[in-house]
Amino acid sequence: MPAASPTGRRRLLLHVCCALCASKALTALRRDEPEVWDITLYWANPNIHPLIEWRRRLKAVRMLADRERLPLLETGTGGDSGYGLTPFARAIGGRENRPDRCGICYALRMDATAQAAKEGGFNAFSTTLFTSPWQDHARLKVAAERAAAATGVPLAYRDWRTEPENRAMTAGLYRQQTCGCVWSEFDRYAPTTLHVWPPPPPRPRPQSQP
Ligand code: SF4
């Protein structure tokens, strides 16, 4: 039984993949559905590696929650306890190619969010992943719908893929370069030479004319 909100609005648990996508979803929700939701952000992302990257993205989400005066729930018991490389790798085990790994990744995060919404008495759950044109939107939607059916918590499905980032909301926040997992990091950098060390020597400056 969902717990009543003191404002009379419905309580939404919004899974947040990163601060940048959160800015899109929050902007759309406030513009298109004013006075409908009391929003609580939820950080559940065992797919983000390595640890420093996970810390940076979580820090950005905490800063955004603070700026927007929104409550934020996190997996784990504080510190780095929510970092999920080991359980994530075990869940993926042997299916590390796309699209299989992404389907497992979506299911892990949507199941965790729907379960947390159920335990917290929320009226519905959703995810900022619905903002991203880089995600497999159809596969993500199926994972979210399955999580809703398994828990009985309604999914607030929205297609926010055309919503632009709210730059005022994200000013100064960390901007990630990969989707999150170690395999996405490989996909991002394998075609580049960004890893080269030592860096190539600087090019000689052109001689100035006498
Ligand atoms: S590429 Fe992104 S969605 Fe796919 S498994 Fe990795 S972190 Fe998850």
Image (cartoon, rainbow, N blue to C red):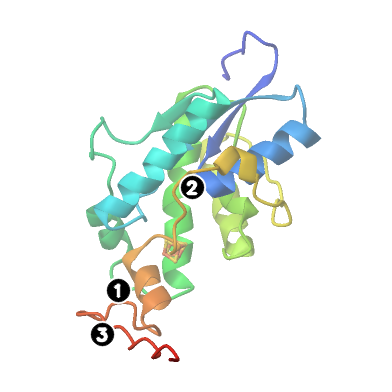
Q: Amino acid at mark 2?
A: Cys
- Considering the image in quadrants, where does the N terminus appear? top right
Image marks 2 and 3: residues in contact by CB distance under 8 Å: no
Q: In front here: 110 or 47?
A: 47
Q: Which residue is mark 1?
A: 94
- Tell me the residue at 19%/80% (across/down): 198
Q: Residues within 10 Å of mark 1 (few under 14, many from 20)?
A: few
- Tell me the residue at 70%/12% (across/down): 8
Q: Amino acid at mark 1?
A: Gly
Q: Which residue is mark 3?
A: 201
Q: Quadrant of residue 156?
A: top right
- Tell me the residue at 49%/43% (across/down): 172
Q: Residues within 10 Å of mark 3 (few under 14, many from 20)?
A: few
Image height of 5 relative to 42, above or below: above
Q: Which residue is mark 2?
A: 18
- Tell me the residue at 51%/44% (across/down): 19
Residue 205, position as x, y percentages in the image: 37, 86
Q: Residues within 10 Å of mark 2 (few under 14, many from 20)?
A: many
- Considering the image in quadrants, where does the C terminus appear? bottom left
Q: Secondary structure at mark 3?
A: loop
Spatial separation of the CA atoms under disc 1 and disc 2: 27 Å
Viewer-nearest of discs 1 and 2: 2
Considering every residue shown, the one lying at the far top of the view is 6
Spatial separation of the CA atoms under disc 2 and disc 3: 36 Å
